[in-house]
Image (cartoon, rainbow, N blue to C red):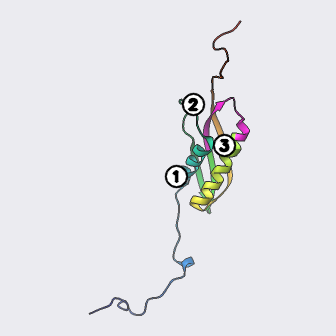
Amino acid sequence: MSTGAGELGGPLTVVPPGERGATRIADRVVAKVASQAAREAVGTLPPDAGRPSATVVVHHDVAHVRVHIELDYPCDVGARCRQVRRQVVERVGDLVGMQAPEVVVQVERLHLVAVPGAVQGRTR
């Protein structure tokens, strides 16, 4: 009866974790994490607004991210973009373990939100 421990010609050797191989995370996986983070940061949007999307290029475990968002208007566009950038950097770092030193937030469209009490239509 064989135990399987020494069948290949000797005792088993333990390979240190750093020499076992590498895990490669696809760019599209990082893009999904970034777009979900952007959705979390943007919050609620008008019904006709598109969902945030992201494109990512990974080079040497560093993610270069471009996020496309639509926002309601009027709003503080700069503050919302900073919040998206901060959330994407945090989530990509936490969930994927990559740095994202470059996060470009591109506002594709602004959706005019009706302000309560504002006159709609044409005025003379």
Badge 3 amino acid: Val
Q: Residue at x 69, y 29 (%)?
A: 74
Instruction: State the CA–CA distance, disc 3 to disc 2.
Output: 19 Å
**Which element carries disc 3, helix, strand or loop?**
strand
Between tags 1 and 2, which lies in front?
Answer: 2
Disc with the residue nearer the chain's start (1 vs 2): 1
Q: Residue at x 51, y 83 (%)?
A: 15
Q: Say if mark 1 contacts mark 3, CB within 8 Å.
A: no
Answer few, some or many: residues within 10 Å of disc 2's Cα (few below 14, many 20 plus, some between 14 and 19). Answer: few
Residue that extends furthest to the front in the rendered view of this protein: 117
**Disc 2 target residue:** 46
**Which element carries disc 2, helix, strand or loop?**
loop
**Disc 1 target residue:** 28
Q: Residue at x 59, y 53 (%)?
A: 57
Question: Does the stretch in magenta take in 22?
Answer: no
Instruction: State the CA–CA distance, disc 1 to disc 2.
Output: 27 Å
Q: Which mark is residue 105?
A: 3
Question: Does the stretch in magenta take in 75?
Answer: yes
Q: Quadrant of the C terminus?
A: top right
Badge 1 amino acid: Arg
- Magenta region, residue range: 67-79
Disc with the residue nearer the chain's start (3 vs 2): 2
